[in-house]
Each structure stands twice: as structure tokens, then as C-alpha cells.
Image: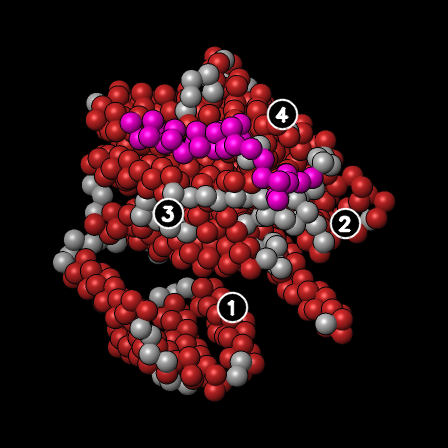
Amino acid sequence: MEQFLFFLLSLSAIAFAVGVVVVKSPMKSVLSLLGSFVALAMIYLLIGFQFLAAAQLLVYAGAIMVLFLFVVMLLNLSDVNAVFDAPIRVLGQKRIAIAASAAALIGMIALFAGGSVQASESVGAIPAEGYDQIEYLGALIFSRYMIPFQASALLLLATMIGVLVLAKRRRDSASDVNSEEPAQ
Amino acid sequence: MNPNDLDFDLLLTPGAWTALWPMITIALGLMMLLAAEVVSSLRPFRSIFFLATLGVAALFELRILAGPESLTDTGGIVLGGALVADATSAVWGLIFLIGTALAFSYSTAYYSGSEARYKDEHDILMLTCPLGMMMMAGAQDLVVFFLGLELLSIPLYILAAYKRSDSKSVEAGLKYFLLGAFSSALFVYGSALLYAELGSVSFGGAAAALAENEMGSLAMTGVGLIVASILFKISVFPFHVWVPDVYQGSPTPVTALMATGTKAAAIAFLLNAFFLLPSSAANLIAVLGIVTMAAGYFGALVQDDLKRMLAYSGIASAGTVILVIAGALANPESLDAARTAALYYIGAYVFTITGAFGLIALFERDGQRFTRLTSLAGLATKRPAMAAAMTIFVLSLGGIPATGGFLGKWFVFSVLVNANMIGFAVIGAVLSVIALAFYLRIVITMWMLPADEAHPIPGADRPLIAGVATAVCVAGVILTGILPGLFI
């Protein structure tokens, strides 16, 4: 049963991922990305990582996808289609990209199928006795990974400041231009 | 994992506090700068806050350098193996702090118009950078390193695009961001592959796993991806093409920070993660280093924009400094010598390149872009002090004896010689001599060509702080050149 579910979910994740690239309409593309994320979250649940599944749904399927949808809806869709339809001639980028991705895929399959790859036993380690998964995660974050945890707080702060600086300035320069226009 | 390993109180030993104080200081300084932005009576003291924060952090680094017992007992490893704080990481920390302080000094009067109005945010972003660098240099864990890398890179992406009205700056920010994000993704992917095989993202855990088994192809792929992303950050061939555009477009004080900080922190990480690299990679890395040097020097020969020239010279320096990794791989006993050589080379380089970019920043004030080589013509008659300082920096970049640049190169090449890679050392030395051609071009332009009357050298109101910074840079270059005993 578990095996069947896993194959079902991973196949649908792959199918949705292919859909993101193949589908012409940006809207459908975003929605199939959502499908891929959800299927991935299910796989996490299947192997017992509830927190990861929840985070995947909340952060990716929730926040990031909504942002994507907003951007796609705010863009002029007919313009976007024109971009997609335009033949990409520069250095045959499309062909190079396809070739490189295919090479990477074949390489990974060869690595795994060749049997030379053995995942470490401690990967996916079960938390120590007496630790709930989320409790364990919390203990890790506030002990060993305290520095990265605090640093990510500062990182978000810096990013926020940066976004404000870059975005707010645009309005300033726009108003500068407006005030100069009558003079011309 | 033993639950006791996760006990907050057990991990936060006195040694851990000692190791963390420099970072805590910078984080507190950041908050203070933010507060100073709101409280108008504190605003005039912003620069003092900035420099004082760096100064206090430097004092804490000196305390680590002194080697208190609480740290030396555990070999400097703290927080359950997440971070190392020993003499090496302390010296790296000092280099980062000095580099940031110098870059900041040159930035105080650099911006004008709407950019000057956003100087507060600029300072906050700039203060985040040394924190990221310290995390990168002290990381004993790929997660810690990655957060440090992002804490350095994301502010730099924003700072690169800080001159919003200048299309070159926006282009620089965008290029740096897209390529940098791509290389960060490579790093994460590589870490995941490494974790899949070794079962740990900490160096201690990975080393333990490697002691039992040979490294398999999955982990090897991971290491390859990680190294590729680091080489991108250091700007080593073939990952160097972004450098000239980004360095030229970014605001010049930011370029100075970018050129020194990223390079130094990434090299520090490579030396820490040294055990992950297979020793058979020595020749590959040496070849990459030499090709990078050649690409940098020959690229610089045909430039006539000063910032682009220095960018190519920065690429060449990256090629030079990764040679120590090759030397240490070929002869593992020379790892300590390689550390010293890298520290010395980068230490001298911080003074040299920050001074050079800083002087350019002084030339191009008032929104005018005096970055052509010809705009330096006649500088010696108009501003002899500035010309003399620039000459010292350029000679140090060229590796003339009695400057820090010469001794840095000397240490790097001697690591190679000790590792029996004399051929590479000779090619490197020959390339350095060829490079003198374009460094001397700058000197000749300053001292021998008559001033261009149509484009007079601008700006008489040089801020005092920039003058002090230039003096510090000159002193640093000369002291590292003639008194190496002071620093080793």
C-alpha cells in the first residue's frame, strides 16, 4: 500500500512538474506547480515527516504560490504569451538547456541505478528516545543550530530593508520624473 | 543523537560565549543603527555607532586570538561542533572587520541625491556583511556556512544595485543576484547530496563517516557542486565572467567590500572544509588557479576603465590565492603554511584593493564618473598625496618588493614549491611579472601624462574619514610589506 501510494504520488509530482514547463498558459503552469508541491508534501507525510509536510504546504503551497499567482495575474497575460511564443534564438539556449538537463538526469539515474550510491543509515534518523519530532526539531534549533536560526532572523531583516530601499526609491525617482516633465 | 547534546545550557559554555561575542556585538550594533534611524537625536552618531561596533567586535576577536582556556580546551570547537573559534578564525574576523570599516569610511561621502537619503539603510546592510563573513569563516557545519553566505550575499546584491538611477548599477545588482542565487542553489544541492551519503552536514560528522568509508560517487558529486559554488564566489575561472560587469556597476565602496570580503570568507571555508577535497584534485585546482591568473591579467591589459581593470586584477588575485589550496592538497603537511599564506595574502590584499577602490570612489564623487584610466592623467601634479597612495596600492597589486602584495605572493608560491609544484609556481611568477605591464600603465598615466584640461580632477572637499582610511591602507600595505614578523 505504502509503495503504491509512493509511486502514485511521485509520478503525479513528476507529471505536474513536467506540466509546469510544457503548459502554455502561465496560470495553468502555476497551478500545476501547486500540484507538484502538494504531491511532494504527501510524500513527506508518507515517510513520517509531519512537520516538513506542514511546512511545505504552508510555505510553498501557501505563501509562495499565492505570490506567484498574484504576479501572474498582475502581469499582462497576452504579453506573457508573446514572450513564450517568441522563438529563442540566442545561442540555441533552449536546446542547450534541454541537453544539460537531460545529461544531469541521466547522470543521476546512472548514479543511483549503478548501485554505487548507498544512502547513509543515519539519514532520516528517528529522534532519540523521549523526543517528539517537533520537540526534537525545536531542541535542535535552539541548541546546535542556534546561530543559523538567529542569523536567518537577521537575514529576513536585511532582506526586508533591502526590498524597501529598492522599491521605495522607484517611486521617488518616478515622482522626480513627473515633476520634471512640465519643464520640458 | 543523545538528547543531552541538545541541552541549551550544556552547549552554551563560557567558551561558546567567547566565540559568539563578536557576532553578538555586530547584531546589537545593527539594532542600534536601526534605532538611531528612528530617534532623530541619535542620527549624527550613526557613523560612530558603526565604527564603534566594529571596534568592539575586533576587541572580542582579539580575546579569541589570545586563546583563553575555555576555548583551547575544545580546540576552539563550540556549540556541539557548529562553529570554530581559534586563532585562525579570529584573524579572519579581524580582516573582515578592518575591510568593512575601510569600505564604510569611503562610503560616508560617496552617495549624493536620493542615494544619500537612504544612507542609513545602506549602513545597516553593510554592517550585516561582516557578520555573514564571520559565520562563513568559522563554520564547521554546512548549514551555518550557508546562512553566513546568504547573510553576506543578499545585502551585497542590494548594495550592488544601490544607485537605482544608474542603469549600470541596476544591471550589476541583477547580474550578481541571478548568478549568485544560482550558485547558492548549487551549494544547497551539493550539501543535500553530501548529506545523503555521509548522514551529516557537520564537518565532525562527515569526517567521522569518511574515516569509516571511502567517499562514494554521490558525496563526490556533492563536493563538486559545493566547490563549484565556492569558486563562483571567489570568481575563479570558469566562473569569473560576472566579475567585471558587477564590479564596474556597483557603487565603488561596495565593490571594495565585495572584492575582499566574499573572497576571504570563501577561501577560509575551503581551508576549513579541506578534508572533503580529494587529494587528486591538487593539479586541477592549480591549473584553474593559473588559468584564472592568466584570464585576469590578460583581461586587465586591454581595459581602459579603472574599475574594470581592478576587477580583472581581482580575478587574478583569486587565482593566486586558490593556489594555496592546491599546494596543501598535494602536501597535506603544509596545511598550516597554506592557512598562513592565505591569511597574509588576503590581509595585505584588503588594505591594497580597498585603498585603490576607495581612492577611485573619491574621484568619482558628485555623480560624475571619473573611472576612465585617462581621467587619472596629471593626478601627480594636482594631488600628489593621492597619486602617491594610489601608486603604492598599484605597486602592491603588481607585487613589487617592500609591499604587502609581494610578500603575500611570496608565501603563496612558497607553499606551491614546498608541495613540489614548482612548475606552477614559476608560471604564476611569470604571469605576475607580465601583469606589471598594466599596473605600470596606471602609474605612468598618473605621473607622466599631462592633465586633461577638459576633464579636471574633481572634488576638493575630501572627508577627513576617507583621508584617515587611506592613511590606514597605505600603512597596512607598507607594514605588511616590510615587517611580516608583526603579523605572523
Q: Residue at x 41, y 24 (%)?
A: B399
Of circles 2 and 1, the one toward us is: 2
**Residue B378 visible in the shown view:** yes
Please say if B229 is above or below B360. below
Q: Residues within 10 Å of mark 3 (few under 14, many from 20)?
A: many
Locate residue B261 relative to residue B126 in the image: left or right: left
- Mark toward the start of the polypeptide (4 vs 2): 2
| Residue assigned mark 2 | B37
Residue A91 painted magenta: no
The magenta span reads: B430-459
Numbered tag placed on residue B385 in the rendering: 4
Of circles 4 and 1, the one toward us is: 4
Q: Residue at x 32, y 69 (%)?
A: A90
Q: Residue at x 38, y 71 (%)?
A: A40
Residue A74: image location, x then y, percent = 56, 81
Q: Are marks 3 and 4 in contact (CB under 8 Å)?
A: no
Q: Chain of mark 3?
A: B
Q: Residues within 10 Å of mark 2 (few under 14, many from 20)?
A: some
- Mark toward the start of the polypeptide (2 vs 3): 2
Q: Residue at x 44, y 32 (%)?
A: B441
Q: Are marks 4 and 1 on the same chain?
A: no
